[in-house]
C-alpha cells in the first residue's frame, strides 16, 4: 500500500490494479498483455498519478532514450521542417531529441558531438559541414546529405533525379534556353548531384543552358549581374531558371522583378526543397520536393537498428515536382 506523501511506485500501481508487478512492468514498457489487465493498470496509473522513471529505465536497459540531432539552424525553412519531422519520428518511438544548432560552425559541430557522447546519447543524426568531423566508433551516427565513410549511413533525396526532373519540367513547359543557379558549400555532398542531373536533363531534351555557381559567402549581387548581362533591350535571354534551393529561388524572383521580368510569363523558375510559406501553406515557388517525413523516418530507423554493419552506406529517396506559381503549368492546362 502506498505510503503517505511519497511518490507512487510500480508496486503501488500493481496493488491498486490487483495485478502482478510483472504485468505493470509490461504495460509500462509497451509489451503485450490482455486488454482487461492493461485497462486496469492504465486506470491505476491515472488514479495514482504514477510517473515512469525514464532515467531508471535507461540504466536498466543501458539506454538514455535520447538522440542528438545536429542541424545548422532552425531559421531556414528546410532545416526547421527537417527538425520537426526528425522529432516526430523519435517521439513515435518514445525517444527524446537533443537539438544542437551549429550555425555552420565547424568547431561547434565537433563540440556538440563530444557533448552528445559525454551525455551517453543512444545515437546522433547530423546534417554537418565539417569534413574532418570525428565520431567515436561505438556511437551510432546517421548522416544527412553527406557520405562520411562506409560505416556511417547517409540518407538523402535523389538529387541527381531531382535536377534532371527540373530540366525536364522546364522543357515540358516550353522553355528553350535555361540557366542553372547555385550557391552553396564547396564540400563534396549529395546535393551537388543536382547540377549533374540538370545537365543530363538539358542534354536529353535539347535545352541550351548556362550555369552560374557561387560558394557560400559570395555576394548574391553576382547573380543579378549575371542575369543583367543576358538582357537584350528589355528581354532576358533565358526563359527558364533552375535554382538549387527554394531559398535561392525566392531571392532570384525578387531579382527578376527588379529587372522588369515577369514570372512565369517571361521566365519560369523552379527551385528545390519543397519549401512552404508558414511551414504548411503554399509552396514559395514551383519546386522539386524532398520527402522530409520519409527522410526523417529512414534516419531514425537506421540509427536505432542494432546491427550496424548491415546498414547501407547510402539511401536515396525519390523526389517529386509540385507547382508553386512560378511555371506556366496551370496556364498551359487552361489553354488545352
Image (cartoon, grey):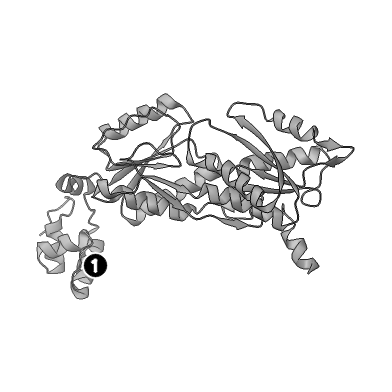
Q: Which of the pair 75/176 is nearer the observer?
A: 176
Which residue is located at x 81 percent, y 41 percent?
237
Q: Position of residue 318 (x, y in %)?
A: 50, 55
In the picture, measured across the screen, residue 32 lies left or right of residue 132, that is left
Q: Which of the pair 23/256 is nearer the observer?
A: 256
Q: Position of residue 136 (x, y in %)?
A: 27, 33
Q: Position of residue 38 (x, y in %)?
A: 21, 69
Res 273 visible: no
**The furthest residue to the top:** 107
In the picture, the quarter occupied by the C terminus is: bottom right
Image label count:
1
In the picture, measured across the screen, residue 1 lies left or right of residue 190, that is left
Q: Which of the pair 284/259 is nearer the observer?
A: 259
Which residue is located at x 22 percent, y 56 percent?
50
In the picture, measured across the screen, residue 166 lies left or right of residue 301, that is right
Which residue is located at x 62 percent, y 30 percent?
214
For numbered disc 1, what is the local secondary structure?
A: helix
As displayed, is residue 115 above or below residue 303?
above
**The furthest residue to the bottom:** 36
Q: Position of residue 116 (x, y in %)?
A: 31, 34
Disc 1 target residue? 43
Mark 1, other Cα within 10 Å: few <14 / some 14–19 / many ≥20? some
Res 191 visible: yes
In the picture, the quarter occupied by the N terminus is: bottom left
In the picture, measured across the screen, residue 72 lies left or right of residue 30, that is right
Amino acid at each position: 500500500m502506498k505510503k503517505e506523501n511519497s511518490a507512487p511506485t510500480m508496486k503501488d500501481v500493481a496493488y491498486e490494479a490487483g495485478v502482478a508487478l510483472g504485468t505493470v512492468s509490461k504495460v509500462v514498457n509497451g509489451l503485450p498483455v490482455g486488454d482487461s489487465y492493461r485497462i486496469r493498470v492504465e486506470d491505476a496509473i491515472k488514479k495514482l498519478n504514477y510517473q515512469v522513471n525514464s532515467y531508471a529505465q535507461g540504466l536498466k536497459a543501458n539506454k538514455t532514450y535520447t538522440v542528438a540531432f545536429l542541424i545548422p539552424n532552425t531559421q531556414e525553412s528546410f532545416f526547421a521542417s527537417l527538425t520537426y519531422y526528425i522529432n516526430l519520428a523519435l517521439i513515435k518511438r518514445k525517444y527524446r531529441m537533443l537539438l544542437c544548432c551549429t550555425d555552420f560552425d565547424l568547431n561547434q559541430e565537433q563540440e556538440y558531438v563530444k557533448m552528445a557522447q559525454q551525455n551517453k546519447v543512444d545515437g546522433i543524426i547530423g546534417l554537418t559541414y565539417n569534413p574532418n568531423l570525428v565520431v567515436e566508433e561505438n556511437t551510432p551516427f546517421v548522416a544527412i546529405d553527406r557520405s562520411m565513410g562506409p560505416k556511417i549511413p547517409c540518407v538523402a533525396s535523389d538529387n541527381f533525379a531531382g535536377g534532371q526532373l527540373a530540366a525536364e519540367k522546364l522543357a515540358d513547359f516550353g522553355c528553350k534556353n535555361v540557366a542553372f543557379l547555385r550557391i552553396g558549400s564547396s564540400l563534396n555532398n549529395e546535393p551537388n548531384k543536382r547540377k549533374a542531373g540538370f545537365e543530363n536533363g538539358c542534354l536529353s531534351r535539347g535545352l541550351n543552358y548556362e550555369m552560374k555557381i557561387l560558394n557560400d559567402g559570395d555576394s548574391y549581387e553576382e547573380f543579378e549581374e549575371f542575369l543583367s548581362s543576358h538582357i537584350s533591350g528589355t528581354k532576358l535571354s533565358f526563359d527558364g531558371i533552375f535554382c538549387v534551393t527554394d531559398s535561392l529561388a525566392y531571392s532570384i524572383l525578387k531579382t527578376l522583378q527588379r529587372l522588369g521580368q515577369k514570372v512565369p510569363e517571361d521566365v519560369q523558375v523552379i527551385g528545390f526543397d519543397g519549401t512552404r510559406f508558414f511551414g504548411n501553406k503554399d509552396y514559395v515557388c514551383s519546386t522539386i520536393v524532398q520527402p522530409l517525413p520519409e527522410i526523417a523516418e529512414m534516419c531514425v530507423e537506421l540509427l536505432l537498428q542494432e546491427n550496424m554493419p548491415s546498414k547501407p552506406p547510402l539511401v536515396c529517396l525519390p523526389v517529386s515536382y509540385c507547382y508553386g506559381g512560378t511555371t506556366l503549368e496551370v496556364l498551359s492546362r487552361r489553354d488545352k
